[in-house]
Image (cartoon, coloured by chain):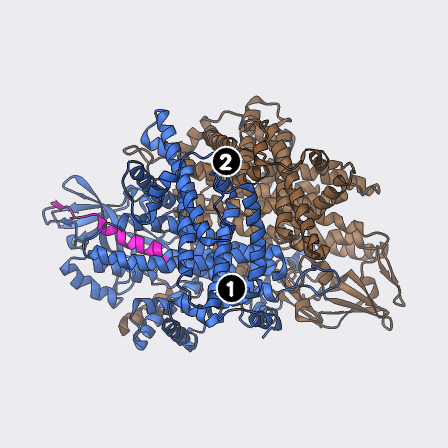
Chain colours: A blue, B brown
């Protein structure tokens, strides 16, 4: 054990183990999680070479192998609870992906929810036994977030009772679905349904892609890998071009909408049901943002405690880099953010389960709010976390660029969350739509409930403010007071955005153009709304902490989170007249004090995340702090070191020397 | 040609070709640049497979091959002017690297400047004929920016007149030098010189690493590749562990310091000479920040003009995504930044050449200022450009993640500039040291000259400001007025940082601790200083523009750059009392107008950068806008598509299906 990191642990003022229990949701959950992790980590079948040393084809191969093993192991161990499966897979995935992920998170669930009885009987057993290996083909080369724009067609032919599937344009080629390129033999394809000369919009169809015996693509199916990407090396994101592919009528998923034998289209009873999966996945991503940032902070903070560099006081030994105020200012607010997002993730999970309970009883009333919240928070947290991972990486200096730090992998595997499951700017604007609608309702005298209820209250307090009539009630040392300030900022920025739309309308432009011409203000309002929600939930979480030591350190973190947000957006708080210039100076001063206050607990706070070395897979983030020996050992295994003299010397350098 | 992009070009209000001449520094330079580019692009020897489809070993192989070819071609074409060589290499490099880059930019130049006469006669011909393939080994596993901490030792043995080179600890292993792993047979090694029982600090030694006949590592030399990184796949960054390696006395570079035969150490006459190379490379990086951002903007803006998505007005065809205000707000300020950095790069280049002229005549007076300026601007521009490349990438939605967009490569190959040649935070603090020193001189009544002269003037104007005594003279539509505001902001933040140090000192902490405890404020002051310099230089450049159309569009860009900076740092401007709340609302409003105003010229402005398709190497950034066809074609060449059925199907999936 590195003596520096040992000393850090000795200086901690709280019980790390207890904080781990809080993060897991209870001591029993911690215990079970560790059991499952040990199952994977101690399993010799899951020991493999570092993926960083493999080619893309080898990485894909390794991912398929692991996926196959994992399915058998889960059966062997009798793990079937979805949360436990998730936990099992998180360990063995590390920062990488499994080959069959879309089969399990999209193909199977869609079959469960959208098959009618006969279809269920036929397809679910095929999918569960993996005879049908499936994916979900929605995105096209020319169309992502805007689903109505999809161009793939399914034209019903009553003569043969078949749908004729086509990719009529180059932009209509399905593009990106995971597992589509090489792994899947079936896909659920979203296509525009044409029957009896009319288009009835998007429907889902089961399309066989490859022979279930030979895995060779079927006639008319042009399928393959879309090529290397930024990360996701082991995933075969694919393309699919359909050329007059005929599928039987009962391959359209018919639980809701139907096409009868003669081609008559029967409408579905309600459209709201499609919301659910999207909302769920976006809520999950919020938690993932917490995880990604927590891992990155673990690596950067442990490394900062063992790395010595430069000097603060001349003549003294080189200090730990964590002693530099600038390093603390980079890392500690991100550590606070990681805790905040983990708690927000827990909250979203609870809300999702509560609301899906309501939905199953026919109560859709909270769905729009959850939809708006999950969209905005997904964007808000993934943007911050992505940028934060890079800050952590760069805080490790040169070694942060090495793949052995794991930070490059964490970044490239997390950053796509900014784009998939709804492009972030589009998400922010969806939340803004809900906020503006709520604001207008409040202005019209309706009493709002739920998370936007502040728009009622604040509408009363939102009299035009001149900077001179600044409030004096804000206490920058009091979290409750800061939650209130964040709330008022959100309220004022929502109002400002609404005003911008109003001003545009006065120029006689259309509603739509007024919206687009106010989009910058709308995104800003959504951002402030989400920031308020996060601060509020973090503060609320503190109320649950019984342990004094933990309550104290988490209060410091929460205060740091709130104050740093104020400093970063100081213009907003000054502009809306919520804080004064002297108060902002106080914020800066207080922030520096909080950094110094957190310094002795930094390593303990990342230890509490409890990522085992095998999961972090980072030389810099090792629990024992012995980074240099292991970096050297890792490097020696680099493929370029397999031979002492690389063949290029004989091929190019020696001949060149002879010519000069 | 895609009709959308044709229409964009038709709508431009200025002469693109003339702007290209301005960026190149004259019509003749444009002409010569294009000639050189054509030499490479039309050369069949430089056609090769997309590097994205190759393994790391194959990429390294390709890089060595190209480096060797290039050396012969440059001779064949008689290109010997350094600027022309740079131009030649930029094309053929694309976003990638050559294998011998350290040989040419560090090994050879160090020999030129640090050899004594005898050494020059022996080593320069060996290096120029590439018999000696060299690199520059400075950074160690445990030490980067802080050179004094380096641990490698060179101990003089008068008995044999040799130096004994050692890596005494694990942290002393040389780590990171490019070309060290496999390519080089020599290195200039920086080591602590020990002779006659005393350490005399860092000196440079020529250390043979590999046999010049067989390329096999010499006894005691443990050398290899440090493993895969975030980018730079084709570069063999290496490690070097020296175990009692003996080199003759004349392998220490002795132009300045010397060790005599008996071991007597002779001091060098001056230490200032070592500044030069660092300052030059940092200045170059500022220009590179402009290039990297210009390439990224070219890709994202062209793609935004041909990509259609979603809807602004219901019922109308999907708009070009560049019509969304949020998309304009992401990309146009970055476009303005790219222009700004290109102009700042030109300026730094001129200043460097002027000052090196002075230095060669013994005048070192401007060196500290240039040193401070290059350090701060290097950090300021690389941070912004790195973040900006990612904004461009994400503005391309899903396709920005594909390697065929080139944006991932631009990012991973540029972002290391934040760390190498001086870690950015350390750079900012070096600039801050110069600013604080200057501020104290001004406060003491000295008249400052040069770029910091504003600290004189503003010291008089820097009376304590209450927010109520806000200036009313600022005109947010007038660039000169904005330059002034940026200047005052810098002055006030420098003062604020100085005040923070003062306050710390009053708590009876040491000077060094006071400095560290004010580091956040110091970085903020440096940042404001650099921002001021960039705005000022951009404004100054406008004065050189004779053409009305170009002057008009660049003025819009400069105004956008200045106003967006104010909006992003609105807290600073409000807090220092330089702008009022109503003025900030004006800024927001004006920004939106400027975005709309730039919209018709966006494609023409990136066209003016004049990156040929072969240099951009981006499917999304194609000049003809035909992105989808070429993306499909590119994907089909992906290595995973070489076989219809991947071997992993037979190895894992089929057996799995049999078991379930």
Q: Select label 1 or label 2 by which is in front.
A: 2
Q: Which part of the image, by quadrant, shows the N terminus of chain B?
A: top left
* Residue B164 placement, left or right of A570: right
Q: Secondary structure at mark 1?
A: helix
The reply to whether residue A20 is in sight is: yes
Q: Which residue is mark 1?
A: A298
Q: Is residue A363 magenta?
A: no
Residue drawn at x 28%, y 37% as measured from the top left:
A445
In the image, A345 versus B323, the foreground residue is A345
Determine which of the numbered discs, if any, sits on residue A467 in the image.
2
Which chain is indicated by disc 2? A
Which chain is indicated by disc 1? A
Q: Where is residue B462 shown, x and y percent of the image?
A: 67, 36
Residues shaded magenta: A263-284
Which tag, 1 or 2, sits closer to the chain's start?
Answer: 1
Q: Are marks 1 and 2 in contact (CB under 8 Å)?
A: no
Vertically, is B91 above or below A122?
A: above
Q: Where is residue A410 shown, x and y percent of the image?
A: 47, 59
Q: Is residue A266 magenta?
A: yes
* Residue B658 placement, left or right of B605: left
Vertically, is A548 above or below B23?
A: below
């Amino acid at each position: 054990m590195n003596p520096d990191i040992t000393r850090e642990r000795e200086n901690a003022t709280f019980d790390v183990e207890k904080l781990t229990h809080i993060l897991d949701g209870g001591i029993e959950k911690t215990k079970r999680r560790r059991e499952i992790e040990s199952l994977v980590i101690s399993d010799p079948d899951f020991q493999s070479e570092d993926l960083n040393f493999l080619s893309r084809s080898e990485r894909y191969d390794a991912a398929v192998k692991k996926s196959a093993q994992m399915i058998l192991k889960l059966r062997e161990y009798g793990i079937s609870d979805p949360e436990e499966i998730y936990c099992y897979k998180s360990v063995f995935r590390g920062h990488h992906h499994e080959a069959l992920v879309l089969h399990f998170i999209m193909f199977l669930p869609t079959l469960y929810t959208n098959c009618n009885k006969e279809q269920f009987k036929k397809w679910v057993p095929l999918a569960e036994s993996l005879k049908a290996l499936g994916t979900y083909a929605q995105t096209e080369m020319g169309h992502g977030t805007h689903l109505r724009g999809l161009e793939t067609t399914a034209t019903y032919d009553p003569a043969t009772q078949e749908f004729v599937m086509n990719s009529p344009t180059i932009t209509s080629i399905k593009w990106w679905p995971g597992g589509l390129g090489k792994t899947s033999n079936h896909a659920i394809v979203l296509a525009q349904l044409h029957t009896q000369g009319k288009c009835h919009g998007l429907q889902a169809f089961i399309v066989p892609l490859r022979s279930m015996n030979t895995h060779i693509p079927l006639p008319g199916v042009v399928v393959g890998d879309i090529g290397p990407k930024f990360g996701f090396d082991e995933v075969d994101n694919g393309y699919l071009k359909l050329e007059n592919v005929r599928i039987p009528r009962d391959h359209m998923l018919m639980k809701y909408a139907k096409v009868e034998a003669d081609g008559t289209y029967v409408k579905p009873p309600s459209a709201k049901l499609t919301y659910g999966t999207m909302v769920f996945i976006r809520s999950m991503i919020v938690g993932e943002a917490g995880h990604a940032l927590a891992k990155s902070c673990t690596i950067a903070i442990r490394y900062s405690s063992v790395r010595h560099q430069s000097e603060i006081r001349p003549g003294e030994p080189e200090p730990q880099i964590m002693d530099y105020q600038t390093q603390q200012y980079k890392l500690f607010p991100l550590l606070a953010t990681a805790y905040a997002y983990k708690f927000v993730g827990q909250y979203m999970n609870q809300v999702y389960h509560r609301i899906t309970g309501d939905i199953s009883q026919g109560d859709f009333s909270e769905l729009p709010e959850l939809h708006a919240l999950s969209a905005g928070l997904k964007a808000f947290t993934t943007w911050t976390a992505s940028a934060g991972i890079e800050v952590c990486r760069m805080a490790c200096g040169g070694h942060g660029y090495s793949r052995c730090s794991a930070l490059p992998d964490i970044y490239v595997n997390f950053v796509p969350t900014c784009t998939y499951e709804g492009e972030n700017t589009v998400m922010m604007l969806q939340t803004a739509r809900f906020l503006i609608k709520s604001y207008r309702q409040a202005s019209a005298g309706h009493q709002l409930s739920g998370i936007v209820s502040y728009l009622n209250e604040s509408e009363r307090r939102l009299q035009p403010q001149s900077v001179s009539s600044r409030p004096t009630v804000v206490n920058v040392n009091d979290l409750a007071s800061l939650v209130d300030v964040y709330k008022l900022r959100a309220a004022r920025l929502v109002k400002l955005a609404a005003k911008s739309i109003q001003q545009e309308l006065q120029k006689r432009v259309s509603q739509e153009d007024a919206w687009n011409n106010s989009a910058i203000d709308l995104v800003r309002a959504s951002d402030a709304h989400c920031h308020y929600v996060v601060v509020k939930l973090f503060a609320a979480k503190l109320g649950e902490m019984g342990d004094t030591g933990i309550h104290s350190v988490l209060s410091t973190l929460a205060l740091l989170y709130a104050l740093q947000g104020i400093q970063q957006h100081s213009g907003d708080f000054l502009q809306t007249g919520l804080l004064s210039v002297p108060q902002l100076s106080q914020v800066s001063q207080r922030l520096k004090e909080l950094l110094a206050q957190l310094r002795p607990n930094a390593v303990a706070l990342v230890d509490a995340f409890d990522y085992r070395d095998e999961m972090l897979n980072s030389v810099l983030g090792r629990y024992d702090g012995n980074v240099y020996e292991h970096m050297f050992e890792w490097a020696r295994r680099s493929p370029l070191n397999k031979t002492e003299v690389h063949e290029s010397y004989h091929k190019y350098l020696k001949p060149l020397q002879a010519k000069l």
